[in-house]
Amino acid sequence: MQNTVKKELAALKNSVTFAMSLGAQELFHTNFIAFILENDDPLLNNIRQNLGKLFGILITTDTKVYTWREKYNLDLVIIAIDWINHINNEDECDSVDEINNPQVCVIEAKLKSIPTLVQLDEYDQKLENGLRFDLNDSDYLQSTEHGLLTGFKLEDSIKPKTITPIYAGKTNTINTTFKKILLSQVPLPSCTWSQQNWNKVAKAIKKSGISTGHSGLSNIVEDYAIDLENLANLITGVINFSSNNFKTQQLFSYKELCDGINASQFKKIRIHDLVGKVVFNDLEQRLFKTINICQCKTLQINHSTFYSNQQPGINFEWCYEKPGDKRIFRIGVQIQGSDYRHYIATNTSWPDLKNLAHKIPDWFFATINKNNLHAKNGITKHNYIKNNFNQHLYRFDVDKFLYSKMELYPLEPAVTFDELEKAINKSLLLACETIDYLISNSKLDDYFK
């Protein structure tokens, strides 16, 4: 895997901006984009206009751009306004007569983390109800008609989308263009936000360029664009490598996939966590497409990629919750490193969780058995145990998360994509039977009472 992106690794190793970005990938990049958009230096005009075009915003030399980072947990909010009769006076507040062509763009930037529909839905709800974005003192604008401008309120109702300039004296709601963009190298299926990838950001900056009259800024911006392009290409490269090699009817094994993620060159430049997340997210999506999901009462199947203890992982689970109750009971299969786990979990503490586990011993693994994953039809029920139960039960939190496990490697022959898919399929079917038993026999009533 590391040889597939050898060129990108070599470039990132010597990139100053990449080294600076490691502490906070998304925030670093949204800060850089905000700096370019807000900067009035004519040398940046071309870049500002090309970035604006990418985000659906028309930026001219008369456009004033305001940005907010991490406001209401939104990664980047951009408001662009053409001021009519705009007087630029650095010693005093600017004076305006009228707001023209207000444009709004909300960006969720994902680079070191994976986008989720749940998170975007939360932002949709916030924006639909309206959010206020205050201006800094230096950005206050004076208008003789309206008084002092102090901020804007954005409202993403279904129709129309509006921006409300907030003056000391009065407000005036205006219909406006309103873009919501997911900026990610990893596509998110069924996403209602417009999706853009980081390659296009790099391209928008590279093709614009800065005149040689400002060599310091030019060098930094150029290094940033090259760094971003290499990082984006690396992400795409490792995902393609995984998709092309660890797939159905291929002999490329799960262990080889994990070895590739943990390759020394990725660790050397501290990018193995990013590689692990994007490769496992791709694996999660592909496995979910191959799984023949059974109907489990009225429950919905959830699946997600996570990262903990320096290893990526995947969950496939059934969730049981009652309307109006924030408590959730979960049962599913988890893959992380060499572990293949069956678990039960709650989102709030429940001291009776361990007692519940003793009532469903068939759900938990007995021993590490290579036949569990190499059986013709995947995992079978006789591979579970009722005896010596406690020694096979593990916990992340005794009142929240209990599991048993078997090893995916070192098994011989090594586990393939097809075997992993069959195992998950069988596990989810057994999980459905188990939760059906728990619900039908009122075993979860104490938790939801």
Image: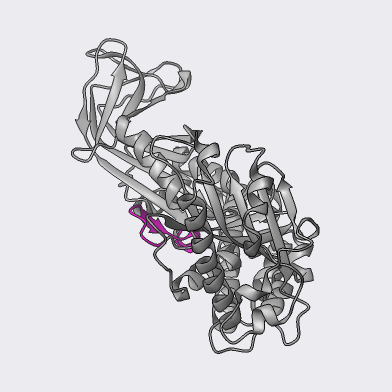
| Percent coordinates x, y for residue 196 in the rendering | 41, 58
Whether residue 340 can be seen here:
yes
Q: Nearer the viewer, residue 291 or 6?
A: 291
Left or right, 49 with respect to 185, comes to left
Residue at 50% x, 33% y: name it: 449
Q: Give the answer, above or below, for where 396 lies relative to 332.
A: above
Quadrant, the N terminus: bottom right
**Which residue is nearer to you in this view: 216 or 162?**
162
> Is-magenta flag for residue 190?
yes
Q: Quadrant of residue 155?
A: top left
* Residue 3 in sight from this viewpoint: no
Q: Percent from the top left, x then y, of residue 60?
A: 32, 44
Tally of numbered tags: 0
- Residue 54 drawn in magenta: no
Coordinates of residue 254 in the picture (x, y in percent): 67, 77
Q: Residue at x 31, y 37 (%)?
A: 62
Q: How is the image coloured?
A: one colour
Q: Is residue 150 left or right of residue 282?
A: left
**Closest to the observer: 380 or 396?**
380
Q: Is residue 20 above or below residue 90?
A: below
| Start-end of magenta stretch | 189-203
User: Can you give x and y, in whole percent of width and height, for residue 21 in the image?
Assistant: 65, 50
